[in-house]
Amino acid sequence: MGEMNKSTFIVSQMDCPSEEQMIRMKLEAYTQVKYLDFDIPNRKLEVYHVNGIEDIQTSIASLNLGDSFQGTEEADPPVIEDQSKQKTILWWVFGINFGFFIIEMTMGWISSSMGLIADSLDMLADSIVYALSLFAVGGAISRKKKVAKFSGYFQMALATLGFAEVLRRFFTSSETPMFQWMIVVSILALLGNLISLWLINKAKSKEAHMQASAIFTSNDIIVNGGVIVAGVLVYFLNSKWPDLVIGGIVFTFVMRGAIRILKLSK
């Protein structure tokens, strides 16, 4: 089989679970790859493998994530963490995100708030990536790519409809959203994300998907805060504009997430 080697890459655009999944799916076909160790905060990937690195290097470069090969050295087999506890936590985080997708989408339509609707799609985007991580473990690459393709196009379609609705409300007379629901639901979503972040940090795991989940959840907290601020501004200004602005901004994040998910299907 050959001796175990460790090759290190710096991947400058690897900042969330989407990029991690892209790399995993790209390298799964190589039997010489034995383990992938992701350090997302530091944008570092360590590939434990036997035999040469050339094909692996070419595959990583094809993803256009700003990779830089740092070198190869002999290494002992890595110590792999018990993932049962991590999976339990990720199930909770997935459930919280998907639950608030439904809640925020429903209340967004009831309260006529594009900010809540956009935030719900942001929650859905996170749920899709978590689902890919949880459901596709050990699954066929072709199945993973089909799930990613469907999810990406579905999310992109929703984001496009959201943008269209924001523009329609910009250029036509539409009702001012119910700021009370914007604030209350966003505070609940914020609490949900804080609980998720607490669960993730409690695991004290160095595994990439756990680190990435912490980054994802931290970004969600910022978005929740933006919707709360927009709700306050709607109240003080008695205007729909703050809600439409935050909605447009978050839909941009959702569209970017959809594009990243679609890259997983290639």
Image (tube, helix red, strand yellow):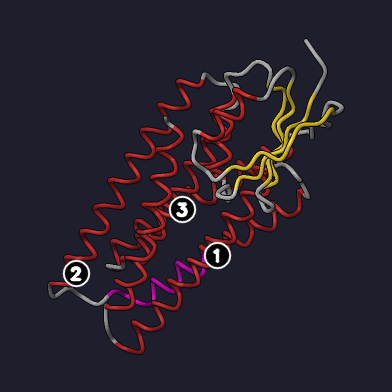
Q: Mark 2 and mark 3: span between their CA atoms? A: 23 Å
The residue at which mark 3 appears reads as: 123
Residue depicted at x 40% and y 26%: 146
Name the one closer to the observer, 236 or 9: 9
Please name the amino acid that badge 1 sits on.
Ile
Pick whichever, 174 or 152, lies toward us: 152
Q: Position of residue 183 (x, y in %)?
A: 44, 74
Could you say which quadrant of the image residue 162 lies in? Answer: bottom left
Q: Residues within 10 Å of mark 1 (few under 14, many from 20)?
A: some
Q: Position of residue 54 (x, y in %)?
A: 63, 24
What is the number of the mark on residue 221? 1
- Residue 254: where, in percent of width, then height? 39, 54
Residue 169 got which mark? Answer: 2
Image quarter in which the N terminus is found: top right
Percent position of residue 37, x then y: 72, 36
Of labels 2 and 1, earlier in sequence is: 2
User: Which circle's residue, 1 or 3, is located before the other in the chain?
Assistant: 3
Say what secondary structure mark 2 lies in. helix
User: Tag 3: Cα neighbours inside 10 Å, few (<14), some, or many (≥20)?
Assistant: many
On screen, 187 above or below 237?
above
Please state which amino acid type lies under the numbered disc 2. Arg
Instruction: Report the residue at 39% width, 71% height from top.
Output: 182
For the record, the magenta segment spans: 177-188
In the visual, does 114 lie left or right of 123? left
Q: Secondary structure at mark 1?
A: helix
Q: At x 60% / y 41%, what residue is drawn?
A: 91
